Image (tube, grey):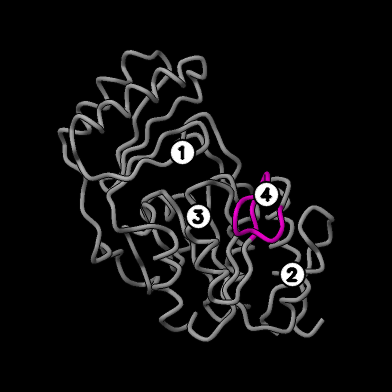
Amino acid sequence: MDGLIAPPFPDATADKMAALTEEPAALFLDVDGTILDLAERPSDVVTPPGLVATLRRTERKLAGALGLISGRPIDELDRLFEPLRLRASGVHGAEMRFDPGLPPMSAPAASALPQSLWTDLTRIAAAFPGAFVENKRFSFTVHYRLALESERRLREAVLRLIASSRIPVEVMSAHYAIELKAQGCDKGGAIAAFLSRPPFRGRTPVFVGDDTTDESGFAVVAARGGYAFSVGRQRPGAIGTFTQPSAVRDWLAEYAGREDGA
């Protein structure tokens, strides 16, 4: 069978996960904070031993219906999981790769944020030691994990900039970060796009994420009769939780190593 299985640990809602065992599933995974542990900087994230092999086996068991739904650009995902290339969405739906053998494409609604906004954000962040800005073309992320005492003042400064610039961006809260992204794309739209195409079409969607930025994906999955699970704490739209990324990895490894029909 190619459905997903109940995890061998109690933090996820086991009875609801067990309901997936008889259904052909399409699995969508956020990356940072979901299958990878968070780090002080995005560049410091480490891919645990064995995870690439687990993802490869999971994709095979799902007949290709595995997609990464990330805020990172797709080329960064490829570096993290090298040599594995998966179907993926990057930068909150602004980048899509429906075929692992082809390069990513920009979503029709995606638009790059202006260089002027990047310049202003880097100037603001420089005033708060430890804060820095990440440029993902379709989104800019202001990180303050190393400047926690400045969160309120930094957030106020960023919001003042957005209000005065009149640049059409969506402001989202993330883990110790403020995410500014172009309007028109989100993780929910990315999941919907995958579900309209093979090998995802006709399967029950399952999405695991950990952050506010994943909640649009939770909503789409629920509307399609699927199952959403959060990591760390309960979030709107999620029907169960995993305590931490290692629990998600354990669940995937158990599924990937399970004999079909077991």
Crowd rating for badge 1 (residues with CA inside 10 Å; few <14, some 14–19, many 20+): some
Q: Is mark 4 on a helix, strand or loop?
A: loop
The residue that disc 3 covers is: 81
- Secondary element at image label 1: strand
Amino acid tagged 3: Phe
Dot 3 falls on a residue whose secondary structure is: loop
Of the numbered discs 4 and 2, the one sitting upstream in the chain is 4
Residue wearing tag 4:
234
Q: Residue, x 71% and y 76% (percent of image)? A: 20
Mark 3 vs mark 4: in front: 4
Q: Position of residue 143 (x, y in %)?
A: 42, 29
Disc 2/disc 1 C-alpha distance (Å)? 36 Å
Task: Work out which quarter of the rendered image holds the C terminus and state it.
Answer: bottom right
- How far, Cα to Cα, is label 1 from label 3? 26 Å
Distance CA(mark 4)–CA(mark 1): 16 Å
Where residue 44 appears, as percent x and y from the top left, is: 50, 34
Q: In this view, does 6 lie to the left or right of 93?
A: right
Q: In terms of depth relative to the viewer, which is nearer, 134 or 241?
A: 241
Which amino acid, by three-letter code, is at mark 2?
Answer: Gly
Residue 224 left/right relative to 238: left
Q: Which amino acid does label 1 sit on?
A: Ser
Decide: marks 3, 2 in contact (CB < 8 A)? Answer: no
In the picture, which quadrant includes the N terminus? bottom right
Report helix, strand or loop for mark 2: helix
N-terminal of the two: label 1 or label 3? 3
Graded by Cα atoms within 10 Å as few (under 14), some (14 to 19) or many (20 or more), the crowding at tag 2 reads few
Residue in the picture at 37% in, 59% down: 93
Give the label, 4 or 2, closer to the camera: 4
Which is nearer the eye, 84 or 120?
120
Q: Name the residue under label 2.
A: 257
Q: Mark 1 points at which residue?
A: 173
Which residues make up the magenta segment?
229-241
